[in-house]
Image (tube, rainbow, N blue to C red):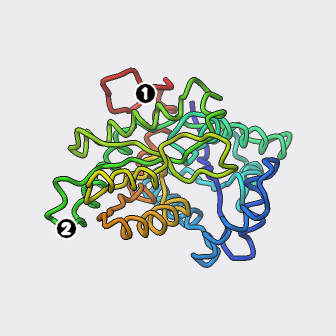
């Protein structure tokens, strides 16, 4: 299968204080989220000047992809579109149509299956093509990549780098904790029985092994909505308190569920969880995400090459069946 463009499709984020509330209203439209809850979340963005890091990281990743393409001597235009904020995917697809693009591969910035990480991006693609109408390019979404060797390597290296920032006397006994975005239990089976949670656990096991850890914990973060609605647990904050109560002196937290240091990483972990760890007397080291590493750019183009050449998916073999294939 041949392609004449690549589209990077992501979640989107505000790039100024005046954009924060409209962005949050876009994200939560139809979900009945109270205004006061949106205003509370808005404070997280306003803490950083109303600018989410996500668009800047994605633009840097696109630059890295273009640099990789240039080194390969390949001329392939790369476009950028979001679900919830500018540049919207509809505008990106319209630009592709105007430029004469007939078929584009779509890389979505989520490694996972499940609804919000996979199926909803497919809905975004369908909606954008319908908005453009006749002549819209064919858009083919690239596969999930939670077990890709480069993703595993990037996170494993990040864990080692985080561990090195801990006091030397605490490193050997530091507890490794993987965290990912929680979802409501009612949504956990939307695209297969507990698919997202099983993929996160599977990837955590691969990364821990690559980083040299035989034991680890896997928890969740960033839940929202009314407290009576059950979400995936345990929450990372509750887990940190439990570890401290059990005598743990150092924790390495790896945000395995995120491919970029966006707001739910830099606020929930670097601010809230770090403050909690300080109060508990726990040394906390946070592993970085792939962000715009050249290895991440190579991962993206590797997924594209698999589809173009009909190659077998690159993946790290695990000890159990891979969830979602």
Residue 72 is at least partly visible in this image = no
- Under tag 2, what secondary structure? loop
So how many labels did they put on this image? 2
Mark 1 Cα shell of 10 Å, populated few (<14), some (14-19), many (≥20): few
Q: Residue at x 14, y 63 (%)?
A: 169
Residue visible at 78% across and 65% down? 22
The residue that appears at 56% across and 53% down in the rendered structure is: 222
- Is residue 194 depicted above or below 138 in this figure? above
The N terminus: image quadrant: top right
Question: What number is the disc on residue 311?
Answer: 1
Give left or right: position of 197 versus 150: right
User: Which quarter of the figure has residue 121?
Assistant: top right
Tell me if I can see residue 11 in this picture.
yes
Marks 2 and 1, the one that precedes in the sequence: 2
Residue 46: image location, x then y, percent: 63, 75
* Nearer to us in this view, 171 or 316: 171
| Separation (CA) of disc 2 from disc 1 | 45 Å
Residue 14 higher or lower than 308, as above or below:
below
- The label shown at residue 194 is none
Residue 276 point in image, percent of width and height: 42, 65
As drawn, the residue found furthest toward the bottom would be 49
- Which of the pair 182/295 is nearer the observer? 182
Q: Residue furthest left?
A: 169
From this view, report whether residue 80 is shown above or below residue 20: above
Q: Quadrant of residue 311?
A: top left
Helix, strand or loop under label 1: loop
Residue 262 place in picture, x, y as percent: 53, 62
Foreground: 214 or 170?
Answer: 170
Q: Which residue is mark 2?
A: 167
What x and y, as percent, mark residue 153? 31, 46
Q: Nearer the viewer, mark 2 or mark 1?
A: 2
């Amino acid at each position: 299968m041949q392609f004449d463009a690549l589209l990077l499709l992501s979640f989107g984020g505000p790039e100024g204080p005046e954009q924060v509330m409209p962005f949050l209203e876009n994200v939560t439209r139809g979900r009945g989220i109270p205004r006061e809850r949106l205003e509370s979340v808005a404070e997280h963005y306003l803490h950083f000047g109303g600018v989410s890091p996500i668009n800047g990281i994605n633009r840097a990743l696109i630059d890295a992809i273009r640099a990789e393409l240039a080194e390969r001597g390949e001329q392939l235009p790369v476009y950028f579109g979001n679900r919830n904020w500018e540049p919207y995917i509809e505008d990106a697809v319209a630009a592709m149509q105007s430029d004469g693009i007939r078929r584009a591969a779509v890389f979505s910035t989520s490694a996972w299956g499940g609804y919000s990480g996979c199926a909803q991006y497919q809905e975004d693609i369908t909606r954008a093509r319908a908005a453009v109408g006749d002549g819209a390019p064919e858009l083919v979404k690239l596969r999930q990549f939670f077990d890709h060797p480069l993703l595993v390597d990037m996170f494993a290296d990040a864990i080692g780098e985080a561990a090195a920032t801990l006091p030397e006397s605490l490193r050997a006994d530091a507890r490794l904790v993987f965290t990912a975005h929680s979802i409501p239990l009612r949504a956990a089976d939307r695209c297969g029985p507990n698919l997202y949670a099983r993929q996160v656990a599977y990837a955590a096991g691969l990364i821990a092994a690559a980083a040299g850890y035989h034991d680890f914990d896997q928890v969740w973060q960033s839940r929202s909505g009314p407290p009576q609605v059950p979400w995936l647990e345990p929450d990372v904050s509750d887990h940190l308190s439990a570890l401290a109560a059990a005598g743990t002196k150092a924790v390495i937290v790896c945000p395995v569920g995120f491919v970029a240091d966006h707001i739910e990483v830099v606020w929930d972990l670097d601010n809230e969880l770090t403050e909690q760890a300080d109060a508990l007397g726990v040394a906390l080291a946070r592993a970085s995400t792939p962000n715009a590493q050249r290895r991440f750019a190579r991962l993206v183009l590797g997924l594209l090459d698999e589809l173009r050449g009909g190659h077998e998916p690159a993946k790290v073999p695990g000890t159990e069946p891979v969830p979602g294939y």
